[in-house]
Structures are given as structure tokens and as C-alpha cells.
Amino acid sequence: EVQLQASGGGLVQPGGSLRLSCAASGFRFSSYAMSWLRQAPGKGLETVADIMNDGRTTYLDSVKGRFTASRDSAKNTLSLQMNSLKPDDTAVYYCTKTGERPLGQGTLVTVSS
């Protein structure tokens, strides 16, 4: 059974930082490109970052220079370091195989003073 569990969300002030983690199991993690997605209140899903098998990354324009995605294929984990957070970053964040819809509940990030 494929399992992807994101964690590390919380409440942070504008300008602050958070680091999200994702634990993957049930599939050959190293064989798949992976993604971080988010869904803001009342809005649709958007892809925040894609991480290729070789670690190359692409980012949503609005997070470039602020977010850094990475993977550890030895530990089957993904990370998303989020700096200089803005209220518009408030959303539920999910980790997924690239091109697939999220499984699981995601982790809520709230950026507010």
C-alpha cells in the first residue's frame, strides 16, 4: 500500500520559516519523481515543487528563492524548507508522486501575525 505522510506544518508569523517532511512507503521511492502540492482555503491544488529522481527541482514562480525541496532516497523522505513565508503561503501541503493526486491528509501551514 502506497503511503505518503506529510508533517511539520503549523502556525508561523510572516517572514518566518518552517520545514516540512514527508515519509514515503509502499513503492520504490527512488524510481519516481515526487512533488509538493498545496491547496489554499477555497482554492484548487497547485504544484509547489517537483523533485526529479536525480534531485533536480522545479518550483512554482511565487516560491522561487524562498522554498527549497529535497529528497533522501536512502531514507524514502522528502523535505520542503520554506523561508520568508507569506500569508499567501497558507495552505494544506501534500507530498505526492508527480502527476498524481494527493493521498492522506496533508499538513496545514498557517502564516499569520
Image (cartoon, rainbow, N blue to C red):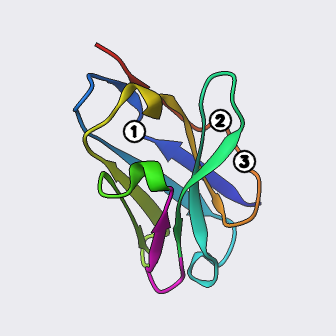
Q: Residues within 10 Å of mark 2 (few under 14, many from 20)?
A: few
Mark 2 in CB contact with mark 1 (< 8 angstroms): no
Q: Residues within 10 Å of mark 1 (few under 14, many from 20)?
A: some
Residue 90 horizontal/vertical position (percent): 47, 28
For the point 45% across and 73% down, the residue is 57
For this orientation, the residue located farthest to the top is 113
Against 38, residue 75 (above or below) is: below
Residue 83 horizontal/vertical position (percent): 26, 44
Badge 3 element: loop
Disc nearer the start of the sequence (1/3): 1
Residue 37 horizontal/vertical position (percent): 59, 49
For this orientation, the residue located farthest to the front is 61
* Marks 2 and 1, how far apart at CA: 13 Å
For the point 69% across and 42% down, the residue is 45
Tell me the residue that label 1 is attached to: 8
Q: Nearer the viewer, residue 54 or 30?
A: 54
Count of numbered labels shown in the rendering: 3
Give the main secondary structure, helix, strand or loop, of the magenta stretch: loop
Tell me the residue that label 2 is attached to: 105
What's the magenta region?
52-60
Whether residue 53 sits left or right of residue 66 in the image: it is right
Q: The N terminus is located in which quarter?
A: bottom right
Magenta run includes residue 35: no
The answer to which quarter of the image holds residue 104 is top right
Badge 1 element: loop
Badge 2 element: loop
Tell me the residue that label 3 is attached to: 103
Magenta run includes residue 57: yes
